[in-house]
Image (tube, rainbow, N blue to C red):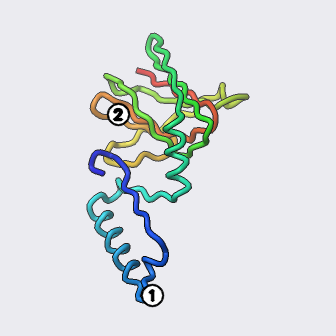
């Protein structure tokens, strides 16, 4: 988890409730307390549905990058919708501006400017970005094709 990966806890209700004693629930509460103490605001709790969407999207994600004079355009697409998808890309300089464009219609032409965030405020908020160690990290709601322009 210190490298930014996921920790997945899987249990059954029967194990948590433990024949009415709730010892499994107490152990789960203690595990959650220790994780929160260790990782603080960098800890993001996700449901099984959210984790499944994230996993399916990242496994099927197709991306294409086109470099312009001062802009890098990333086009991201997956057959699965994924709220809060975070991607990263090499970026030698801190971006001046990061925008996303939607899949079609007016949203494809209307930019949404992403909010810069401190790398200490992880996980990223949706429509936020940060730059750290020569990489830009971007968080968007992916639903169909989404383009992200990174202006250097």
Task: Give residue 33's quadrant in the image.
Answer: bottom left
Which disc is residue 47 wearing? none
Helix, strand or loop status at disc 2 = strand
x, y percent for residue 141: 56, 41
Q: Residue at x 30, y 51 (%)?
A: 1
The C terminus sits in image quarter: top left
Furthest-top residue in view?
A: 69
* Nearer to me, 75 or 10: 10
Classify 10 Å Cα crowding around label 1: few (below 14), some (14-19), many (20 and above): few
x, y percent for residue 75: 54, 25
Task: Give residue 31's quadrant in the image.
Answer: bottom left
Q: Is residue 145 left or right of residue 105?
A: left
Q: Residue at x 43, y 37 (%)?
A: 129
The earlier-in-sequence mark between 1 and 2 is: 1
Q: Is residue 5 left or right of residue 58?
A: left
Q: Mark 1 highlights which residue?
A: 19
Q: Mark 2 highlights which residue?
A: 131
x, y percent for residue 119: 33, 42
């Amino acid at each position: 988890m210190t490298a930014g990966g996921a920790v997945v806890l899987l249990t059954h209700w029967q194990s948590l409730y433990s024949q009415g004693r709730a010892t499994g629930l107490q152990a789960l509460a203690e595990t959650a307390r220790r994780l929160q103490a260790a990782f603080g605001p960098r800890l993001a709790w996700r449901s099984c549905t959210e984790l499944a969407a994230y996993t399916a999207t990242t496994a099927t994600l197709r991306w294409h990058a086109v470099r312009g004079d001062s802009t890098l355009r990333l086009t991201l697409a997956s057959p699965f919708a994924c709220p809060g998808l975070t991607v990263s890309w090499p970026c030698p300089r801190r971006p001046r501006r990061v925008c996303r464009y939607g899949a079609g219609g007016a949203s494809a032409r209307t930019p949404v400017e992403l909010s810069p965030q401190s790398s200490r405020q992880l996980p990223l908020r949706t429509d936020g970005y940060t730059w750290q160690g020569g990489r830009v990290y971007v968080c968007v709601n992916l639903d169909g094709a989404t383009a992200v322009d990174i202006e250097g």
